[in-house]
Structure formats: C-alpha cells, structure tokens
Amino acid sequence: MLLDPKRKEFENPEVFIPSLLSGNEVVADIGCGPGFYCTVLELYSSKLYCVDVNDEALKLAKANSRKSSTTFLREPSDQTSIPANSVDVIVFANSFHDMNRESTYRETLRILKPSGRVIIVDWKRDAPFGPPLRLRMDPEHYLEIFKDFTLEKTFSPGPYHFGLVLRRK
C-alpha cells in the first residue's frame, strides 16, 4: 500500500505539496519510508534529506529518486546527522505517530532553522483504514507537542488525512 499507485486516489502529495513549498528550501522528510513523498519533495526543494531507519524502505526511496542531490540517511528520527539549524522545512507524512515523540521533537528543534516550518500529514481518527487507532493523533495533540510552534495553516491532503503547517516561534 505504501507505494501503490491507488494511494494517490486518496492521498496525492503532487496535489498539495506545490502550494506548501517555495522550491528553494532545504527539506527533510523524516520517516520517509519507501519514498512516497520523496519524489514529489525533490521537485519542490533545493536540497532534500530522506530519513528512515528501515534499510529496505530507503533502498526503494533511493531507487525512485530523480535528483542526485537528495541525501538518504538510514538513521533514527531523533538522532540524525543533519547539521543543526540547516533545514527550512521538516515533513512528517504519516510517520510522527510511530516515533519517540519527545526525542524526535528535540531533534526537530535542533535541525530546523529559527524560522523554519513543520508540515504534518497524518491519518484522521475516523479513517476506515490506516494505523491502529491507539497510534493515531488528532491535530490538537500535535499542537500540544509542538509547543514552540504556531499553527500557520491547515490543509486537506485527502479524505482520510489532515494536514498542518507549523512555524517555529
């Protein structure tokens, strides 16, 4: 399902990512999995980091990559080798709910530039499929965790997901 073309019928980053990125930003896709978002993010960033702990998923992401400037890192979300204060935008697409929230949040603060943004795409609680209900997070829960950020905008990535754009205070 992660790379199934039918996924684009209900979650298509090609539709909403262009309106969220300027094209000249350094972007990190944290928890990128097999790269469903990476191929789109490459088109709208000046540099892209694709980070995941799963070696097989990263191999798939790299195989589908279109730009040689994309950096693939097999690292945990809370201990990346991305330089401090170097990223304009961090993307958590269907991934943050699986991570250690406290330590990943600290890593977000470390690598993100002072005025950087975080884009979150995640499953709605009432979606008929997706991760187990116990893992799903509401937008309000994200706002509690990302306490050093303000909500810049919400968007709809599709019928089963919600989207948040947060800006660092």
Image (cartoon, rainbow, N blue to C red):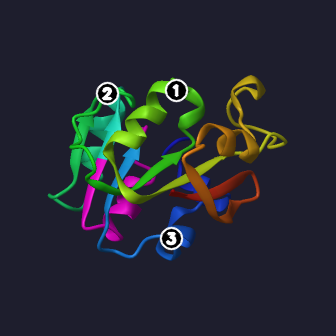
Mark 2 vs 3, N-terminal side: 3
Given this view, does label 2 or label 3 mark the residue nearer the observer? 2
Percent coordinates x, y for residue 40 in the rendering: 40, 63
Horizontal placement of 138 versus 55: left or right? right
Mark 2 vs 1, N-terminal side: 2
Horizontal placement of 163 versus 115: left or right? right
Percent coordinates x, y for residue 133 in the rendering: 77, 28
Measuring 25% from the left and 53% from the top, which residue is drawn there?
86
Tell me, yes or no, whether the highlighted magenta stretch contains residue 95: no
Q: Which amino acid, mark 1?
A: Glu
Q: Which amino acid, mark 3?
A: Leu
The magenta segment: 31-49
Mark 3 vs 1, N-terminal side: 3
Q: Whole-Å distance between the Cαs marked 2 and 1?
A: 12 Å
Tell me the residue that label 1 is attached to: 102
Q: Which amino acid, mark 2?
A: Gln
- Decide: is 55 above or below 125: above
Measuring 48% from the left and 35% from the top, which residue is drawn there?
105
Tell me the residue that label 3 is attached to: 20
Measuring 71% from the left and 36% from the top, which residue is drawn there?
137
Residue 82, quarter of the rendered image = top left
Callout 1: few (<14), some (14-19), or many (20+) C-alpha neighbours within 10 Å? few
Callout 3: few (<14), some (14-19), or many (20+) C-alpha neighbours within 10 Å? few
